[in-house]
């Protein structure tokens, strides 16, 4: 089973900053896929890895002042 996390309102200073954000997200253990939908990111996480993945996503989102919601 997977859980989905919605990420919104990330603030990027430049294209490189945005690239770093996506690179960090892609390195999180337990992420199944990342999809862009209506200017939001939907991140699917394997339920077996959800606690650590959620903590890692929160840490990244805090840097870029993004909001996260569990779906």
Image (spheres, helix red, strand yellow):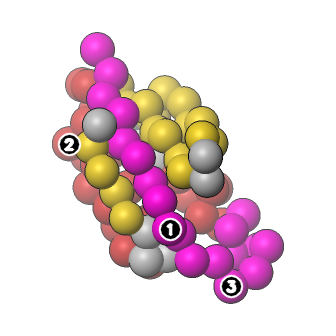
> Is any part of residue 70 visible from this angle?
yes
- Quadrant where the C terminus is found in the figure: top left
Residue 13 has which mark? Answer: 3
Is residue 15 part of the magenta span, yes or no?
A: yes
39 with respect to 10 (left or right): right
Residue density around tag 2, few if under 14, some if 14–19, many if 20 or more, within 10 Å: few
Is residue 13 part of the magenta span, yes or no?
A: yes
Nearest to viewer (mark 2 / mark 1): 1
4 up-or-down from 5: above or below? above
Expressed as whole percent of the image width and height from the top left, the position of residue 39 reads 61, 53
43 with respect to 46 (left or right): right
Q: Which residues are magenta?
A: 1-19
Q: Quadrant of residue 50?
A: top left
Give the labeled residue for mark 1.
9
Residue density around tag 3, few if under 14, some if 14–19, many if 20 or more, within 10 Å: few
Give the labeled residue for mark 2.
51
Q: Residue furthest top?
A: 1
58 up-or-down from 30: above or below? below
Residue plotted at (36% across, 42% down): 5
């Amino acid at each position: 089973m997977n859980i989905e996390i919605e990420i919104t309102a990330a603030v990027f200073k430049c294209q490189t900053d945005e690239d770093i954000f996506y690179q960090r997200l892609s390195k999180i253990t337990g992420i199944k896929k990342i999809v862009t939908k209506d200017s939001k990111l939907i991140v699917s996480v394997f339920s077996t890895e959800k606690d650590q993945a959620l903590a890692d996503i929160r840490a990244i989102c805090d840097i870029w002042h993004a909001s996260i919601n569990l779906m």
